Amino acid sequence: MNQINKEWEEYKILQDKLDKIGDFRFKVRGWTITVISAVVTGGFIGNMTPFFLILPLLLVFIFQLLEKNQDIWQEAFSKRVFRLERQISRKPNESPRIARSIRERHSEVKHGGWFDKLALYAYPNFFIGMYFLIILVLLLKLFLSQPQPNTVVKTPVIKPLSATIHQVSPPKKENSFTNSNATANPLNSQKQSPQPNDKDILKEKEKMHPEDLQFAQ
């Protein structure tokens, strides 16, 4: 009787551990879906660079390692639970069948319809699908970031400052000092006026009347 009670206690402890492992795996996959949703949103709506999407791949890999660690413990606990059920079922009035029922259902799903098979194989390959989705978003981001061949990208041309500024020579200013001296000193203006030569004086004397000539002398 004491042996049966010990097996029952161990069986209950292992079932509790299996429930906690299942809850932890559900949380890890929820974190993974949250990261993937942020990557898809930031990749197509935000200004996230394509190479920034490599970081989610690392995060998904870490989540996969955490789940793989729990899978190892789950497999060990499941084998022990199955052995305990076989030992307890040999006793009278004691017949737990949780582990054996799950194994039987698993074998039935393998021979069931295509949707059951898809659900069965999709669960262990969850992280492979996440890797594929991130790589798909990365390829689409790289494709959309490339310039289209039909569109011509005009690059602004910056001209140097010396080419835009024309050197304009200032207008020549008249020498106001010389003009003022010319108006103020009439002698200077007389010096600048041309003087009559001797031939012109003789011609003027010939045209004059003799009396005027005597008067001029």
Image (cartoon, rainbow, N blue to C red):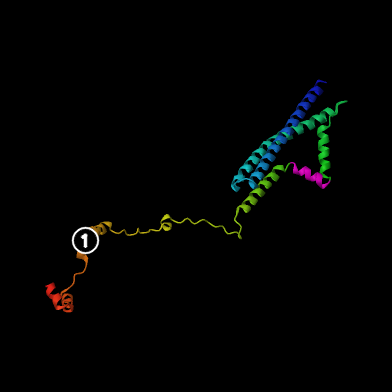
Q: Quadrant of residue 125?
A: top right
Residue 128 position in % (x across, y down): 69, 45
Circle 1 residues within 10 Å: few <14, some 14–19, many ≥20: few
* Label 1 element class: helix
| Magenta segment | 113-123
Q: How many marks?
A: 1
| Amino acid beneath label 1 | Pro
Residue 123 position in % (x across, y down): 75, 41
Residue at image location 78% in from the left, 42% down from the top: 120
Residue highlighted by disc 1 = 186
Residue at image location 81% in from the left, 23% down from the top: 4
Q: Quadrant of the C terminus?
A: bottom left
> 121 or 197, which lies in front?
197
Residue at image location 77% in from the left, 29% down from the top: 15
Magenta stretch encompasses residue 126: no
Residue 179 position in % (x across, y down): 26, 59
In the displayed structure image, the side of residue 168 where residue 24 appears, left or right: right
In the displayed structure image, the side of residue 97 where residue 62 appears, left or right: left
> 186 or 170, which lies in front?
186
Residue 159 position in % (x across, y down): 46, 56
- 151 w.r.t. 118: above or below: below
Tell me the chief SS of the magenta region: helix
Q: Quadrant of residue 152?
A: bottom right
Q: Quadrant of residue 12?
A: top right
- 50 w.r.t. 203: above or below: above
In the displayed structure image, the side of residue 165 where residue 99 appears, left or right: right
In the displayed orientation, state which residue is furthest to the right.
Answer: 93
